Image (cartoon, rainbow, N blue to C red):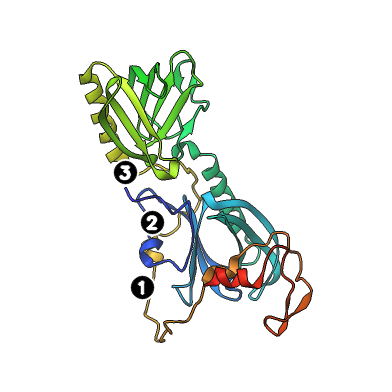
Amino acid sequence: MDVLWEDRDVRFDISPQQMKMRPGEVLIDCLESVEDTKGNNGDRGRLLVTNLRIIWRSLSLPRVNLSVGYNCVINITTRTANSKLRGQTEALYILTKCNNTRFEFIFTNIVPGSPRLFTSVIAVHRAYETSKMYRDLKLRSALIQNKQLRLLPQEQIYDKVNGVWNLSSDQGNLGTFFITNVRIVWHANMNDSFNVSIPYLQIRSVKMRDSKFGLALVIESSQQSGGYVLGFKIDPVEKLQEAVKEINSLHKVYSANPIFGVDYEMEEKPQPLEDLTVEQVPDDVEIEADEHTDAFVAYFADENKQHDREPVFSEELGLAIEKLKDGFTLQGLWEVMT
């Protein structure tokens, strides 16, 4: 399975291939007339709301687009914005953080009187936030109740394996495996809160390896989830082999059609993405090779800035510039750009 980036990244001007839904990604809503007020004010576009991200695409120039993953979202709110298409109106503000950089997005619905932009995005993001157990590796969570696994809404138990030793300590801990359609859960028999939940989404490999305790089941998690190497001892060897075979089989099935757990449906079903996609026509322009443009610059978020700082004369540049924030230098800003 390809590394999941759609919900964990903010990308600008992505290719048609990256615009396509990955396996398990579902189009939940499509709004036809939405303005990207922050970066493309005055430009009408289409906003797609999936179970992993928000995609905005310019209708006049489809190669101008955004992909905003829900995992990057810090805050969603509504505020007044100045739109070239609507004037002063209520808009959707989304503050995000990606690779230690904050981006701010402002979307305005061109259709007056329609709250759908706000309700769709906010509700789907809430559904994403409350379903992280499907996607994230969790340690010491509230997984077990009365020695039974607390099932997620779309989860089914395929097998329960008793007598599984967790090899994370020198003496090992005896516990139980639950193997389901979305994850593997282990918990200690003497202490239910000593547990681990490993979604198939975060599993890199499942193998049998030699250890100081003998042959063991070893699960490597993805770098996204911390790159853990988790060892488990199951006796006899035949039982261990069966468990490895079953987990790998379920992992393969899951990878073909992942369950991300974001359960939200609109009353009106949107058209399939294929029907909404238009073929990109190559622009009849020649792009200078040394021309440096960064689409993301327009979306930088300065959350403490309420108004422009006063102008000051820069001896370096020989002209008036906005006063720099404390700790910033012109040389440092040039180094960011180059």
Amino acid of disc 1: Glu
Which residue corresponds to the image point at 31% horizontal and 21% vertical from the top-left?
233
Where does the image place residue 201, in percent across and percent down from the top left? Answer: 38, 41
Mark 2 and mark 3 lie on one chain; the one further toward the N terminus is 2
Question: Which amino acid is tagged 3?
Answer: Ser
Labels 2 and 3 touching (C-beta < 8 A): no
Disc tally is 3
Q: Mark 2 or mark 1, which has the lower sequence index? A: 2
Determine whether 129 is above or below 6 in the image.
Answer: above
The reply to whether discs 2 and 1 touch (Cβ–Cβ < 8 Å) is no
Residue 313, picture quadrant: bottom right
- The image position of residue 151, as x and y in percent, is 45, 28
Q: Nearer the viewer, mark 1 or mark 3?
A: 3
As rendered, which of 87 and 177 lies closer to the eye?
Answer: 177
Q: Is residue 198 visible?
A: yes
Q: Nearer the viewer, mark 2 or mark 3?
A: 3
The residue carrying mark 2 is 21
The residue identified by callout 1 is 279
Give the percent coordinates (x, y) of residue 81.
Answer: 69, 67
Query: Who comes first in sequence, dot 1 or dot 3?
Result: 3
Outermost residue toward the top in this view? 190
Residue nearest the viewer, comparing 229 with 90 = 229
Which numbered dot is residue 255?
3
- The vertical placement of 153 against 270, above or below, is above
Under tag 3, what secondary structure? helix
Question: Quick check: 140 left or right of 331?
Answer: left
Q: Secondary structure at mark 1?
A: loop
